[in-house]
Amino acid sequence: METGHAKSPELHDLCVFILTSPAPRCAACAGTSPMEKANFVDYIRIFCRSGKGGAGSRHFMRTKFNAQAGPDGGDGGRGGHIILRGNSQLWTLLHLRWYKNVLAEDGENGSGDNCTGRFGQDVIIEVPLGTQTRDEATGEIEAEILHHGQEIIWIPGGQGGRGNAYFKSATNQTPEYAQPGMPGIEAWKVVELKMLADVGLVGFPNAGKSTLLSTITAARPKVADYAFTTLTPQLGMVSYRNDLSFCMADLPGIIEGAHEGKGLGHRFLRHIERNSVLLFVIPADSPDHRKEFAVLLNELEQYNPELLDKQFLIAISKSDMLDDELKTAIGEELPEGIPHLFISSVTQQGLQQLKDALWAALNATPKAQV
């Protein structure tokens, strides 16, 4: 299959890859944007074209003893499909970064002796679980991959045309026409990944989300004392009682105006849509805990109002610096009806209670939040 690079014809001829395996990069394909240089890729724009159907054959049988034995034109072959297949071993769309054009093979034309043309070879694109595709022009969602091994015919190939043998009848015994093959579908498509996790950590930059994830899971996100330390989503498995576990995602910090594209939130807010429970992490030294929660909630609502139907919990991080009186005062600031806990990733304070609360929320009947 061809890729979409043609800056150097000599080197481009060598750039023929298989979509289901990681591909090396040739010198002709140099010059990507800074966004593409990151290993975590969750948004890809590609041009797709399914295969054209082969034309039916307009052929008449001629034998030694019968020069007019009748029509025997075969049907054309179907054009190749573009198929999506879920792969649980993939975590990003990085392996698709080099493919600007995805072109399926055309079907072959039919031939005499009622021979059907060969079907065009399908293109199978392996994607991580949680991948969603949509048409760039209309914005319509076309496919969604949620399970390992799940296959969806994303862009069907064109149907092959009927040969003239198909049109033979008692009143038309020598049809001199056949159908052409149907054209393939071509369009610019958008492939985006929305990570699958049970719990999503939501909070301002430097709220302690990455420290919490590194403490209760085996994940090792970058931890530092400055804002926007986390630039890409991080996943970790939380061990629970009786060998149970659940998945937690640390997302880049949200700032006010993230739904409008400010900061990094706009790029990663899509991942929150997949989380069953949202854990709002608010640091103990925040000047106004209630306002901080309200700002975060407003950003989620502006991005997608359906996010308000998820289960919410609030964790006050860095609580090792608080005494009982301050905890009581902070608890009175927080909104009613949403459970809150005081935790410290450094001293392990309240982490088991947090796991219990998250597990209970994951197994509770979903209901609208206040």
Image (cartoon, helix red, strand yellow):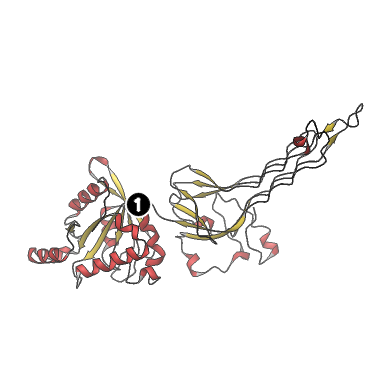
In this rendering, position of residue 287 left or right of residue 144: left
Q: Quadrant of the C terminus?
A: bottom left
Closest to the observer, 52 or 271:
52
Q: Spot the residue most to the front.
A: 171
Q: Considering only vertical position in the picture, is 149 above or below 199?
A: above
Task: Evaluate whether residue 145 shows in this view.
Answer: yes
Q: Position of residue 309 (x, y in %)?
A: 30, 55
In this rendering, position of residue 276 left or right of residue 325: right
Question: Few, some or many C-alpha atoms within 10 Å of disc 1 (few <14, some 14-19, many ≥20)?
Answer: many
Q: Residue at x 34, y 57 (%)?
A: 306
- Residue 332 picture quarter: bottom left
Q: Position of residue 258 (x, y in %)?
A: 36, 69
**SS under mark 1:** loop
Q: Residue type at mark 1?
A: Ala
- Residue 201 picture quarter: bottom left
Q: Considering only vertical position in the picture, is 137 above or below 274?
A: below
Q: Position of residue 357 (x, y in %)?
A: 20, 50
Q: Spot the residue most to the left.
A: 325
In this rendering, position of residue 262 left or right of residue 113: left
Q: Residue at x 19, y 64 (%)?
A: 318
Task: Evaluate whether residue 250 shows in this view.
Answer: no
Q: Which residue is mark 1?
A: 197
Q: Residue at x 69, y 46 (%)?
A: 53
- Residue 266 picture quarter: bottom left
Closest to the observer, 324 or 64:
64
Q: Considering only vertical position in the picture, is 58 above or below 252?
A: above
Q: Position of residue 300 (x, y in %)?
A: 33, 63
